[in-house]
Structure formats: C-alpha cells, structure tokens
Amino acid sequence: MAKADSFTAFLEAKQRLQPAAAAATGATPLSLLFKLAEAGPMPLAELQSASGMAFTDFAAAVKNLSNSGYLDISGAPGTEVAKLTPLGENVSRLGRPSA
C-alpha cells in the first residue's frame, strides 16, 4: 500500500470516527488508539476505565476501530484484550498531536 493511500485512509477514518466522540470526557475513538500506543495491549475493561467513556460510547468506538482494521480484540468474553494492528499503530503515530 502506498504511503499516500495510508494517509488518505487515516484522514477518512479520523473524519468518520470524530462524530462518535464522547463530548463529556473529550475522549474519542482516536484517543483510544493513542492510549494503546502509549500503554501497549490492555484488557478492554482497563481501556474503558482509562478512556473515561460511557460504556455504550466505548463499545461503539471499539467496534468501529476493530471493523476499520485499527484494533485487534482477542481473548475469551470478559477477558478480551485490545491491541493495535500495524495500521492502528501507523494511524496513532500520524494522528498524535505534536508536543
């Protein structure tokens, strides 16, 4: 895949994911990618707690990220672990605010 295609996919995903943001906490699906990029794979329950998102917003964000190919969920129900895919790692790097 060409780099231009990856960036275009990133921009499209960012635009698609923004409406699903949890306004009260400022958490967004993209912020979940940033959290996983910093912390590495983590149980969904911990990720949800760290996100500050309401359960329904979090579930929708995780589903969207997984369906978009940015997030891999593995493990038995109740012990699922979220992990960035290579595409998710790239998007988190490209979308991270500069310091």
Image: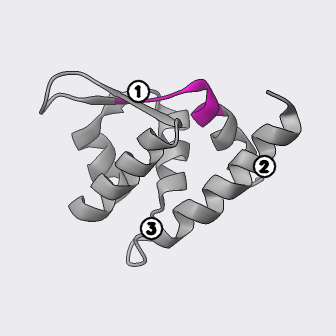
Name the kind of residue labelled 1 in the image: Pro
Give the labeled residue for mark 2: 8
Residue 72 placement (x, y as % from top left)? 41, 29
Residue 96 visible in image: no
Q: Are marks 1 and 3 in contact (CB under 8 Å)?
A: no
Q: Secondary structure at mark 1?
A: loop
Residue 16 visible in image: yes
Q: In the image, what residue occupies the spot 54% across and 53% down?
A: 30
Name the kind of residue labelled 2 in the image: Thr
Distance (Cα) linking label 2 and label 1: 26 Å
Q: Residues within 10 Å of mark 1 (few under 14, many from 20)?
A: some
Q: Quadrant of the N terminus?
A: top right
Distance (Cα) linking label 1 and label 3: 22 Å
Mark sitting on residue 29: none
Q: From this view, report whether residue 72 is shown above or below residue 66.
A: above
The magenta segment = 82-89
Q: In the image, what residue occupies the spot 22% across and 59% down?
A: 55
Residue 74 placement (x, y as % from top left)? 30, 23
Give the labeled residue for mark 3: 20
Give the labeled residue for mark 1: 41
